[in-house]
Image: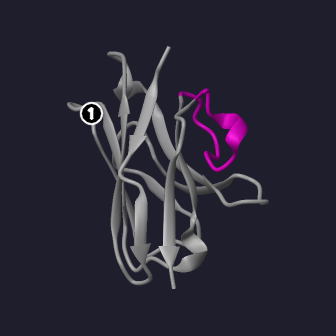
Amino acid sequence: QVQLVESGGGLVQAGGSLRLSCAASGRTFSSYHMAWFRQAPGKEREFVSLIRRSGVSTNYADSVKGRFAISRDNAKNTVYLQMNSLKPEDTAVYYCAAGQRYSLGTRTFEYDYWGQGTQVTVSS
């Protein structure tokens, strides 16, 4: 079992930055691929970014590429999402997810554990 707790969301103006954190329980954090998804009102949950358990391989949605950066600290059981140059369309609830299957990694069903989400609101 893995429990995930996100933090760091909030209200920011367009062009600003936020850093999300996801703290995981358990001693097997390093065995999980970690990802961030987001869900805007009335829309489906969508992939944002992932980082493999190695911490070396990452992937980003085209909509955030060049603006967001994912990282992990296995010693702290934490994954981060640095979000820069935020846009109003980035407004959503951001979810952290953990999974052990080595697959595409961009689909919600590939992850076994989810956090409760943190709200990010970007004003224009």
Displayed quadrant of residue 46: bottom right
* Percent of width and height locating residue 69: 37, 63
In-front residue for pair 3/106: 3
Instruction: Answer whether residue 48 is visible to the viewer in this image.
Output: yes
Q: Residue at x 55, y 70 (%)?
A: 90
Q: How would you classify the magenta stretch by its main secondary structure?
A: loop
Q: Where does label 1 land, which residue?
A: 74
SS for callout 1: loop
In this picture, is 52 found above or below 66? above
Nearest the eye: 4 or 111: 4
Q: Residue furthest left?
A: 75
Q: Exactly how many numbered labels are in the figure?
A: 1
- Give amino acid for label 1: Asn
Left or right of 94 in this view: 42? right
Magenta residues, as a range?
A: 100-113
Q: Position of residue 86 (x, y in %)?
A: 45, 76
